[in-house]
Image (cartoon, rainbow, N blue to C red):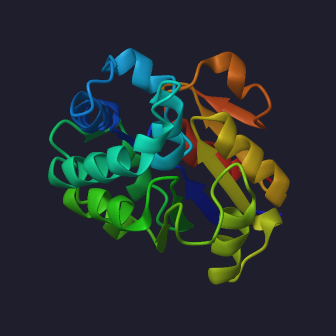
Amino acid sequence: MPIKLIMFDLDGTLVDTVQDITNALNHALFSHDIKTLTVKETTKLVGEGVTRLVEKVLPEGKEHLKDDVMRKFLGYYSEHLIENSKEYPHVRETLENLNQFKKAVISNKREALSRRLLEELDLAKYFDLIIGSDTAGERKPSPIPILYVISKLGLSPEESIVVGDSYYDIEAGKRAGTKTVAVTYGYQPKELLKEADYLIDDLRELAHLVQEIE
């Protein structure tokens, strides 16, 4: 069945946000005298949303600080959302070449931040729907966000494909019954993306790929 809907992950797939996430996280950790992280260290931890990110970085005995660290992270991140963040190469060009498809963003970042990030980078206009971790009640790797978007746009899993840079995207797509595409330039190493139906090194490959899928 031809593809009619393309669902994109955000961080690590469309936009490189890890520097701004690292800065916000370090701002929150530093205020509690907790060891800060390098961008490389943060890159290995992102993908499951801010709650899980904070849980991962809090040392033993500091778990009670979670709510305050999250509050400080979100406050700083909201104020510095696109200070260093930028779209990956060929994102805009590819989206413009996919005009005939319905397109959505499914992020494990909160919806308001996801939407604002895309709006401030002038990318929101390319999408029929933008949702975040707080939109559908669950976050990837749950299939619920995928099925939510498919239902909202009146299509079926067989007509849909998920594009992401992480295991969470691929697992969510597979559990929802869609085809999956992993991009290799994102935050997770290639060996964790082997379960994807397709692997691409350059987002421009997507326009040809989705035309070929039956």
Q: Does 41 sit above or below residue 2?
A: above
Residue 21 location, x and y as percent? 32, 37
Q: Position of residue 30 (x, y in %)?
A: 23, 28
Whether residue 161 appears in this view of the structure is yes
Judging depth in this view, the residue of 204 and 117 nearest the camera is 117
The residue lying toward the viewer, choosing from 196 and 212, is 196
User: Left or right: where does residue 128 sit relative to residue 199?
Assistant: left
Q: Give above or below for 19 relative to 109.
A: above
Q: Is residue 169 left or right of residue 206?
A: right
- What residue is rendered at 34% in x and 32% in y? 18
Position of 176 relative to 195 (above/below): below
**In the picture, which quadrant includes the N terminus?**
bottom right
Q: Percent position (x, y) of residue 193?
A: 70, 27
Residue 76 left/right relative to 51: left
- The answer, for residue 186, to whether it is visible in the render is no
Camera-side residue of 157 and 26: 26
Splitting the image into 4 quarters, where does residue 145 fall?
Answer: bottom right
- Name which residue lies at 54% across and 72% down: 135
Tag count: 0
Where, quadrant-wise, is the C terminus in this rendering? bottom right
- Residue that appears at 46% across and 43% down: 64
Q: Is residue 137 above or below residue 16?
A: below
Question: Residue 199: which quarter of the image?
Answer: top right
x, y (%) of residue 130? 46, 68
Q: Nearer the viewer, residue 79 or 146?
A: 79
